[in-house]
Amino acid sequence: MKKIFMPIGDGSETLDTFYAYYRLPEDGYEVVTAGKEARLYHTVLHEVPPNPDIPWDITQERPGYHLKAMAAFRDLEAGDFAGAFVSGGRAPEYLRYDQDLLRILRGIGQLSRPIACLCHGIEILTAADCIRGKRVTTVPKCELDAVQGGATYVNEPVVLDGPLVTARGYQDNTALLAQFLKLLQGC
């Protein structure tokens, strides 16, 4: 069974992460969750509260489900994976400093294997230098991260550029996974 690398950490967005975590095995892929350590992590739910009487400028964060990392980043190699799925949430904010995570994603990119990314996951791809010269999308508040990574940001639901497919957020999960699966089947 082909393996998909999925980095996670405390603060990974629940819907971003779990949709792919359960959807990819339906097509015969093993999702390998990995973190700084092989342990249980806490996911979170992000949304802008829909109450127009009390507007929010940023997303509100609430606890989500838990997910265990099967392995630590330091113990994995890019060549073992058919592709990578990078979800959003708050986790990318601190995971992007992990050099082993960046090594794995750079390696998957250098092998021209598919990488799917949504929401704040772009922070990790920027740090790994995986989006330079590419067209990408992400949540609008991460546009700067995409541009700093050398990419051209477009505000579209899903953007495909070579073996890279990006989406804005969990609302675009279905379209993102459809494109990612096409890329994986083409390998």
Image (tube, rainbow, N blue to C red):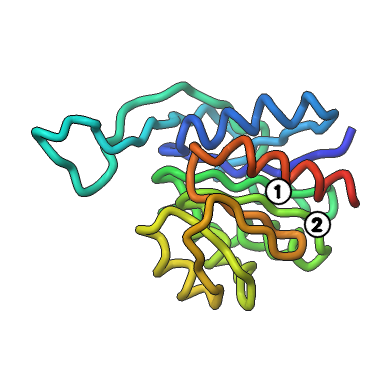
The circle on residue 84 is 1
The residue lying toward the viewer, choosing from 43 and 141, is: 141
Q: Is residue 184 above or below residue 163?
A: above
User: How many angstroms separate mark 1 from mark 2 (CA)?
Assistant: 8 Å
* Mark 1: few/some/many CA within 10 Å (<14, 14-19, 20+): many
In x, y percent, where is residue 127? 53, 67
The residue lying toward the viewer, choosing from 147 and 182, is: 182
Q: Quadrant of residue 24?
A: top right
In x, y percent, where is residue 174? 62, 35
In x, y percent, where is residue 36? 55, 45
Asked which secondary structure carries label 2, the reply is: loop
Residue at the left extreme, as displayed: 53
Asked which secondary structure carries label 1, the reply is: strand
- Residue shown at 81% from the left, 39% from the top: 3
In the image: residue 38, left or right of residue 187: left
* Residue at mark 2: 113
In the image: residue 137, left or right of residue 93: right
- Residue shown at 48% from the left, 44% from the top: 169
Q: Are marks 1 and 2 in contact (CB under 8 Å)?
A: yes
- Residue shown at 64% from the left, 67% from the top: 130
